[in-house]
Image: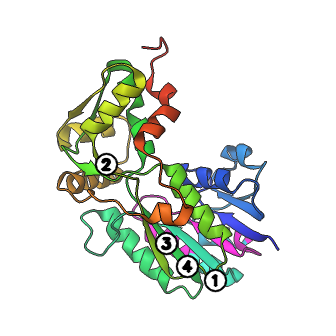
Amino acid sequence: MSRTVLITGATGTVSTALMNALAGADADLRALVRDESKADGLRETAKVFVGDLDDARSLPPAFAGVQDVWLLTPNGPRAPENNMNALWAARQAGVERVVRLSVVGAAHDAPNRSGRLHALSDRETEQCGMRWTILRPHWFMQNLLNEAGDISATGTFSLNTASARIGMIDVRDIAKCAARVLLDDPDRHHGKTYTLTGPRSLTFDEIADRLSLALGRTITYLPVSDDAKRKTLLGYGVPPWIVDMLEEYAQAYASGWGDFTTDTVAELLGRPPRDVAAFIRDHAAAFTSPDGN
């Protein structure tokens, strides 16, 4: 008998990949969106509900009759409140299982505000009275796409991570792991927290080498200061809270905090996680200027 799965944050990077991973599976998908105008592409695979995790009163219709919830909260100071609202709506609706997207290194003493806030929500999820699984993915390879404009235009990209070495992961593998959990028997992954990484820990100089090889031209990583990156991000209109959060992550990575990998993706999927070379090949067009240089 198929189960009804509610995907929160349905227009975001990870949830979109998850819906693709669940396409064709024996599951009735629902998508929770804040902005109905962005949901047109979802209607072929899911029943769309409009609701906002900021507004608990908007959630009951989406949760009614659902067995499984994929819980993704937006980055921001209200993330614990968003998690609380979703868990309350799930409990009131009789949801059986919650699969929650957390962050790498979530803990009360994490060196970044995001990790500390997610630790609060992880703890709440563990005590929610429903079956639960928590996924804690490492730095997304898709973050490199934020640098694609500079790479295509100048052959360089700049981050304030110094010589950090990071076990970055392709979002598509996060989605495949989430789909595996959601499609398995609800008891199989109950009470588990999975830290998800790519196959190896790499520096951004090594990323530049792989970009150069795939694109056939020299790509250079240029480390910059926290202040320089802050100025750039604020200039793009990134909210100050997010800029502060990203700076905290960068400082942690520069200290060696992200230099590790796990075997969890391979254990869940029966294959190794995608490496960054494969990610670059799949997204080569994004890193290439219109004239092909």
What is the CA distance from the residue labelled 3 to the residue labelled 1? Answer: 17 Å
What is the CA distance from the residue labelled 2 to the residue labelled 4? Answer: 31 Å
What is the CA distance from the residue labelled 2 to the residue labelled 1? Answer: 34 Å
| Apparent side of residue 168 relative to residue 85 in the rendered image (left or right) | left
| Residue 52 shows up from this direction | no
* Residue 91, label in figure: 1
Give 131 or 58, whichever is nearer the viewer: 131
Point out residue 236 in the picture as x, y percentages from the top left corner. 37, 35
Decide: marks 3, 4 in contact (CB < 8 A)? yes
Tell whether position 73 is magenta: yes
Decide: marks 2, 4 in contact (CB < 8 A)? no
* Residue 1, label in figure: none
Callout 1: 10 Å neighbours few (<14), some, many (20+)? some
Bounds of the magenta span? 61-86
Query: Closer to us: mark 1 or mark 4?
Result: 4
Name the image quarter holding the N terminus.
bottom right
| Residue type beneath disc 1 | Arg
Tell me which corner region of the image, top left, top right, bottom left or bottom right, holds residue 184.
Answer: bottom right
Query: Closer to us: mark 2 or mark 4?
Result: 4
Q: Earlier in the sequence, mark 2 or mark 4?
A: 4
> Residue at 59% of width from left, 50% of height from top?
17
Residue wearing tag 2: 243
Tell whether position 129 is magenta: no
| Residue type beneath disc 2 | Val
| Residue 242 shows up from this direction | yes
